[in-house]
Image (cartoon, grey):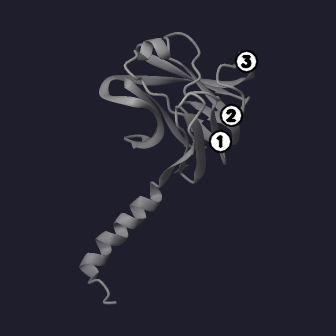
Amino acid sequence: MTPLPLSCAMPVLAMAVVAAASAQTVTPIHPGQAGSPHVRYEREVEGVHVSIEYGRPRLKGRALADLAPAGRIWRTGADEATTFRASRALVLGPHVLEAGHYSLYTIPGPREWMLVVNADHGQWGTVYDAARDVLRVPMTVRSGQPMAEELTISIERAATGHELRIGWGDVLAAVSIRAK
């Protein structure tokens, strides 16, 4: 095989480094009891391995406000509670979250959502004990986004580092996330 000239090899190498640095994977887990696919989302954030498992409900013509009512705790997914694992401590917004295995809930609102990190995990999504909350973090809301039929949770690069994002319908809720 003929080696690439240096002028071609450098851009290819640079793309490989960028791809490795921002590598994220979404792995299907199972179809879910009510048909919502369940996935495992994995991403490295500044050397911290983050894994999120959740059911991805679809709007199916329904209003987001009916499925995730404002001011009420929401399972942030379908079926089982959404789980969140971090291999090392993270900073979510202004709060430190120690390494561990948690469940995620949200409290939707028109201008702000609240991300709720709970010490329980493995329970059905509607089983929630506020006494087990580890932290609550405000999330900024960007309305008027392109419509997302299926709930999507991801960690994306942002101007200030990374953001944990929850998008569904025309709403995108986000909070900064970084290694401690």
Circle 1 residues within 10 Å: few <14, some 14–19, many ≥20: some
Q: Residue at x 56, y 11 (%)?
A: 72
Q: Is residue 46 above or below residue 35?
A: below
Q: Is residue 171 visible?
A: no
Left or right: where 84 falls relative to 24:
right
Image spot of residue 178 (x, y percent): 53, 42
User: Where does the C terminus fall, quadrant-wise?
Assistant: top right
Q: Earlier in the sequence, mark 1 or mark 2?
A: 1
Q: Amino acid at mark 1?
A: Arg
Q: Give the residue pinned by disc 3.
A: 129
Image spot of residue 32 (x, y percent): 58, 34
Q: Which mark is residue 85?
A: 1
Viewer-closest of 24 and 46: 24
Q: Residue at x 46, y 12 (%)?
A: 66
Q: Give the residue pinned by disc 2.
A: 102
Image spot of residue 10 (x, y percent): 31, 74
Q: Secondary structure at mark 3?
A: loop
Is mark 1 in CB contact (under 8 Å) with mark 2? yes
CA–CA distance in space, label 1 to label 2: 6 Å
Q: Earlier in the sequence, mark 3 or mark 2?
A: 2
Viewer-closest of 116 and 54: 54
Is mark 3 in CB contact (under 8 Å) with mark 2? no
Q: Is residue 154 visible?
A: yes
